[in-house]
Image (spheres, rainbow, N blue to C red):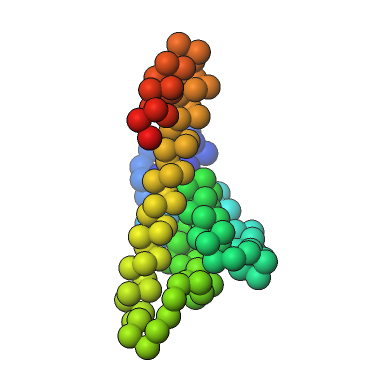
Amino acid sequence: MCVLLSHFRGLINWEYLLSPNDTFLPTFKKAIEHWGLLKSDNSIYECLVEASSLQMSYALRRFFVTILFFCEPTNVRSLWDQFYIHMVEDYPSTSTTMGSSLTNMLLRDLNDHLLTTIKKTFLRQLFYDDSEKIVLVNKAVALS
C-alpha cells in the first residue's frame, strides 16, 4: 500500500488504487503488480539457479536467507519449492529420513542464518549510526 500511496497523490478513494485500467483487483499487492510498480523476481530466480549449480548447499542456504532479508522477493513459496532440493543436498539422508525431517532441519538452519544476519546488521547499524554508540557495540560483541 505504501508503494501505491507514494506514486499516487491526492487520491479520493481506495477503489482507484485497486482498479488499474478499470479492473478491480482483490489485493494491494496484485494492484501494485498490475500498475507495474513491483519488480519481478526473475533476477532473484536467475541468481539462485546459478548459485545452486556453483555453490555448496550450505552457501546456498546462506544466500537464500540473504535474499529473503535484503531483497524481499514477492513469491517466497515458489523460490522455496524450486530450490528446496538444492538446499538439503548435503544433509545426511537415510531410509528413515523423511521429507518433514529434512524440512525441519532446513528451517532450523535458515532460522540460524537469519538470526546471524539480523545480529550482524543490527551491530553494523549501531556502529555506523553514531560514534557515541561504539561503547554499546563493544558490549554487544562481548556478550556474543
Determine the residue located farthest toward the top in the rendered image.
Answer: 132
Residue 90 image position (x, y, % from top left): 51, 72
Q: Residue at x 40, y 66 (%)?
A: 106
The residue nearer to you, when weighing 66 against 55, is 55
The residue at 39%/19% (across/down) is 136
* In the image, farthest residue toward the bottom: 95
One can see residue 120 in this view:
yes
Query: Could you tell whether 130 is left or right of 115 in the image?
Result: right
Give the x, y percent position of residue 3: 47, 42
**In this orientation, does residue 41 appear?**
no
Above or below, 100 relative to 54: below
Q: Classify the position of the N terminus by image quarter.
A: top left
Of residues 75 and 105, the one nearer the viewer is 105
Number of marks in picture: 0
| Above or below 98: residue 106 | above
Residue in front for this viewpoint, 116 or 128: 116
Q: Residue at x 46, y 44 (%)?
A: 117
Rendered position, 135 above or below 122: above
Query: As rendered, which of 47 and 101 lies closer to the eye?
Result: 101
Q: Please state the horizontal and vertical placement of residue 129, each as a whole percent of the image.
A: 49, 20
Residue 81 x %, y %:
46, 73
* Residue at image location 35% in from the left, 81% down from the top: 97
